[in-house]
Amino acid sequence: MMVTSECVGRERELSELQARFDTSTGPDLVLVRGEAGIGKTTLLARLTRLHQDRRDTGRTLWAQAAPWETANAGGILGQLIQDAGPSGDTDPVDVLGTLLDEVEPTLIVIDDAEHADAESLQSLISLTRTHRSLRFLIVAAMTHATMPLADLLTDQIHLTGLDTTAVAELAATRGLALHPTMVDILTRHTGGNPRAVIALFDELPSSVWSSAHQELPAPSYVVDDIRARLAACSAPARSLVEALAILDDADTLDTAVTLAEIDVDPLSAMDEALASGLVVDPVGLTPAETQPHLADSMVQTAILEVMGVRAVGDAHRRAASIVTDPARRLHHQVAATPTADPALADDLDRLAQQRGAEGAWAEAAELFRQAGRLTADPLLHDVRVTKAADALLAAGDCVGAGALVPLVESLRETPMRNATLAYLAILRGRSAEARVRLDRAWSIVNFEREPDTAAVIAQRYVLHNLVRCQGSELVQWADRAIAMAGSQSPAGIEAAAIRGLGLAWSGHPDEAVAEYTSLTDRIKFGAQAQRATMGRGWLELGLDDVDAARSHLETAVSMANLGGSRRISLWALGWLARVQFLTGDWDPALLSVEQGRAIARTSGIELATPLLNWTATQIHSLRGNWDDAERSIAEASTGIGDYEIMRIPAVLARAHLAEAAADYGKVRRTLEPLVHMAQDVPALAEPGWWPWVDVLANALVVDGHLDAADNLLSSYEDRIAERGHRSAGARVKYARGRLLGATGDINAARRTFDEALELLDGLPLRYDLARVNFAYGQTLRRAGKRRAADAVIGTAREIYLSLGATTYVERCERELKAGGLTTSRVDPDRVGLTPQEEAVTALVARGLSNREVAAELYISPKTVQYHLTRIYAKLGLRSRSELAASLR
């Protein structure tokens, strides 16, 4: 048995197999499937070692089939039995059954089962049917489906490639530290195949792995295999395979046939290429529609190596004369041009600018990079390299742009260089660095000679002020960028796509709506439309047009596949998750969060992570998933130098977690800094954008700071009324109702809560509706209105139950029980306790302090102590620990 690598990235599969073994009550059989080199043998070896290290398990039997043993009847059974049992004519199945009967449970492992003899496999399957009283697990691994296992077994584990985390861990086991960008490149190049990954580790110098950008070859064993398979092909089939290696996947079969110069019967050549395994055929297409492509990028790399540099160059030159798309034609010309070519570089630069104007920034970045490589003039080369990095950032690829940063920083200082480095700082959330670089860029730009660059810098100021949540400054810089670049330019369009938010944050929501309506009507297609659509959805969420917000944000997310930017998709997912949270679609919200997290990880954009984790924290804490909530809080952590659009949701996440845990003192301490921040951050003070005032005011009321709560609410109520913002109005009335109830004015409290519910009527905000009903019911119960409280809290409970908000379902049930109208007032085990005393007993027994119990039940700590004194007297107890022990 040979193990080629450490078993990393297979924890789930190992756990599943171990669980199958531990929980089996009889025979069991599972098939492990996966391509060659994917780690099947390593997985089985690790499973065997774990099994052998456990003293409470039976024996392990191991067999490994070989191609030349397929016709050896009973060969696998012989390996399993070895010298055990009698010889002669004894049936080996009976011998194996005896072995299993002697020591059980037993793990039986068969590696390379596709080469196993049919008699042995049939006997093992029969064994599972004839010895049902024995406990054993058969784990068989195979690459290719063969009879009888693959056809008889539906219970299979499919091994896929390792993810980036596992690839990095595999590198660490060999003493290699990979650059983060290289981890992604290596994982994509190999498909996460451990054998290919390890082969490249062994064949390439260690310096390759510390670099950010290297083109990786195929492992030598892959090249040898490809060389043999190409040699076995006929000339037409080989020419077709080589043509596919030169062309893009989007090119048609007709283009490939033309490049391969196949004159007759191209379908036969294609059939042969498919049979070789080098080419795969999309499923479900007719032969006339089929556009075959190579199996993976590693196969393509190996084919190009086998072809040789000269043949590859010649093929690219021929392809340039065949393809019709201008970008692809230039790509082929570049691939065939190893030295500087100023004319070709100029063509690339022009096309890059055109693609950038259309918003296709990823394509523009590659074109600028190629133009830089072919540029001999050092100053022009620097400009094009800088533009390549800038275009990558516009596409939302901070990782790719970050790899170019050392090169960009080494270039002479220019306004564009500073603007590009500022852009990267913005997307990474580094506010101070971005401001310094922008100010420097603005101070040295020549407005007459470089108007386009000046417009780009102005647009970066727009983005900078967006994430600072500064509405007026945002509008000023947007107007400047549009005036400089024109409304149809990329900088002008992006500035316009953000300008409406600045208008709303500076108190002009109607103007903002009109601007976005005009913009989205004017720009309906292409990547630039994604920016306008996302901005409009964000605005509509802030203005309570929730259904429209959902529609536009979902559209912006879907536009990523039409040449849009990952940066814009990330923001769209962040705000879409907020819409889904507020409307009660919590499972889809968590899916949106995970999609956004994946984009953030792969793109390197850190700005939106706190926004995503705010939603995740809130849902997990309301559902009582405290560990998940804490993890989301940790991921949302920010520093004092981070942008406001990062710091605000991070603060809100911590406050909502504390509120769900009924730690209102912590809620107050967490949110009070926002009172001061709101003086400098207009968006924080504008209704509807950040829901924090009601949360803080509620915590102040529960903690007994009634005057502070009144002052806070008074400072926002007039503005909310002036804006006519319904959900923000409902939220402050929720807090005002709490405050009025705490001061004893129950009639005014009831009117205020009713007004809050009326404001929410017609809005699909289920979370806010549940929240208002719960507070309303608690206030009524405290005022002695038990029957009315019972009805309102019952409504809150039903909404929370539909959301899966177990934290508040339990609170509603405690309130209902404490009210004594819907549940029995006497517990046989606690005779004499009132419903309120029963509620206090349950919470104290859980370890809550008097203050925490008071917050949960919305009573004072002194009232809790009063109830405790009566509980101790009734039950004959003396302490909290005795009370807890009595309930165990």
Image (cartoon, rainbow, N blue to C red):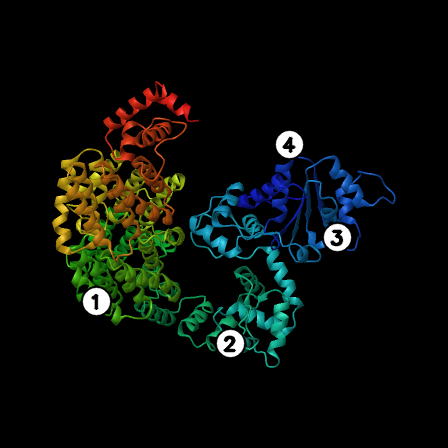
Comes first in the chain, label 3 or label 4: 4
The front one of 456 and 718 is 718
Q: Which mark is residue 255?
A: 2
Q: Would residue 98 be visible to someone looking at this image?
A: yes
Q: First in sequence: mark 2 or mark 4?
A: 4
Image side of residue 93 versus residue 198, left or right: right
Q: Nearer the viewer, residue 507 or 561?
A: 507
Residue at 38%, 47% in the rendered image: 804
Query: Which numbered marker is on residue 485?
Result: 1
Q: Nearer the viewer, mark 1 or mark 3?
A: 3
User: Which type of secondary structure does the marked residue at label 3 adopt?
Assistant: helix
- Point out the tag, 4 or 1, that comes first from the N-terminus: 4
Front-most of residues 106 and 873: 873
> Measuring 27% from the left and 29% from the top, which residue is drawn there?
851
Among the 4 quarters of the image, the one containing residue 45: top right
Q: Earlier in the sequence, mark 1 or mark 2?
A: 2
- Label 2 is placed on what type of residue? Thr
Question: Residue 122's mark?
Answer: 3
Residue 809 percent coordinates (x, y): 35, 42
The residue under label 4 is: 56
Q: Local crowd at mark 4 within 10 Å, few (<14), some, or many (≥20)?
A: few
Q: Amino acid at mark 1?
A: Ala
User: Label 2 vs label 4: CA separation?
Assistant: 64 Å
